[in-house]
Amino acid sequence: MTGAAGHDANDRGPNLHGRLQPVLDAAGGRLSGDRLELVQRAHLVAAYWHRDQWRRSGDPYITHSIAVAAILAELGMDHELICAGLLHDVLDDTGCTEQELVAEFGEPVVELVRGLRTLDDPERRPPDWETSTDERVLTLKLADRLHNQRTMRFLPEEKQRRKARETLDVVVPIAGRLGLVRVEEELRRLSTATLSGRGGIRASFGVITAGAIMLPAGARGRWLEEWLGELHALPGRRARWGFAVRLIAGMPRLARTLRAEARRR
């Protein structure tokens, strides 16, 4: 591949593929052999093309791509969709071309990325896109929106509210129709917290949700539901921020406990 060709993991530092570990953990044993190599290559190529780009949070842009891929892996998606999650912003936000991606990853992966580009472009998106779009592309869209909702606190407030309203009105029903119950519930919780905006609930819950990625996927929704209720019950912004800080500090221990309980079952 032009530009990325000849770059191996060492070009971006020793921890390049270490950053991919959340995706590999979420995929379990489903990635091996050629499929694992393709996912690792997608990560390498995405990291190369996004190498000088940053999120509003100050994090390297590639952290978003990895998070989207991890969500897809948690949902049990195959290696092609996981690759598309890693590469989903490369065509729009970098100098990489479709031809280069097709040569590297094949038409099925690039068709998924291309499909998401169409959905993200109001001028090209069909009016019935919610029902006419391929379900795999919709799943990619949901994963992208879910991570963006988790990190929404870094956007201007008006954009946060607009995206949250769109999520509740349009995106949440798509998740429900596809049977992605955990995605549906988390998107609803995050959007509701954003629109409520009471005394720091939105920002506090955004921090908690970002930290909850450490928890096992199956338990995450239940805990987030409980914590959102507790945030609403607390008396003010300072109490809510203190609650969020304490939760984040204890999150690694809770994650270890939940995983140990799951192994004993």
Image (cartoon, grey):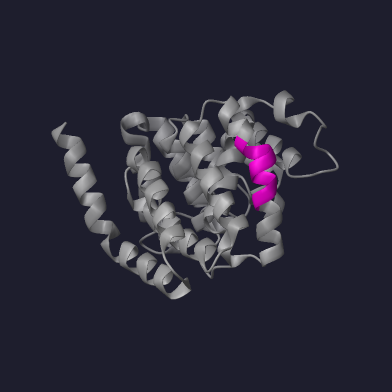
Which quadrant would residue 169 be assigned to in this image? top right
Q: Residue at x 64, y 30 (%)?
A: 107
Q: Residue furthest left?
A: 264
Q: Give x and y (percent) for residue 247.
A: 32, 62
- Asked whether 141 falls inside the magenta stretch, the response is no
At 64% across and 43% down in the image, what residue appears?
Answer: 168
Q: Which residues are magenta?
A: 164-172
Nearer-the-camera pick, 258 or 105:
258
Would residue 227 be found to the left or right of residue 1 on screen? left
Visible in this render: residue 244? Answer: yes
Q: Residue at x 73, y 39 (%)?
A: 119
Location of residue 208 (image quadrant): bottom left
Nearer to us in this view, 50 or 174: 174
Image position of 99 with respect to 240: above or below: above
**x and y percent of residue 257 in the render?**
19, 48
Q: Is residue 168 magenta?
A: yes
**Left or right: where 6 falls relative to 97:** left
Relative placement, left or right, of 48 versus 70 is right
In the rendering, at what x and y percent does residue 60 appear? 52, 64
Q: How many marks?
A: 0
258 to 195, vertically: above or below:
above
What is the residue that sits farthest to the bottom in this orientation? Answer: 238
Query: Which is the main secondary structure of the residues drawn in magenta?
Result: helix
Identify which residue, 80 or 211, lies in the foreground.
211
Residue at 52 percent of width and 47 percent of height: 189
Q: Residue 88: horizontal and vertical position, in percent?
A: 61, 45
Tell me the quarter of the image containing the C terminus: top left
Is residue 38 visible in the rendered structure shown here? no
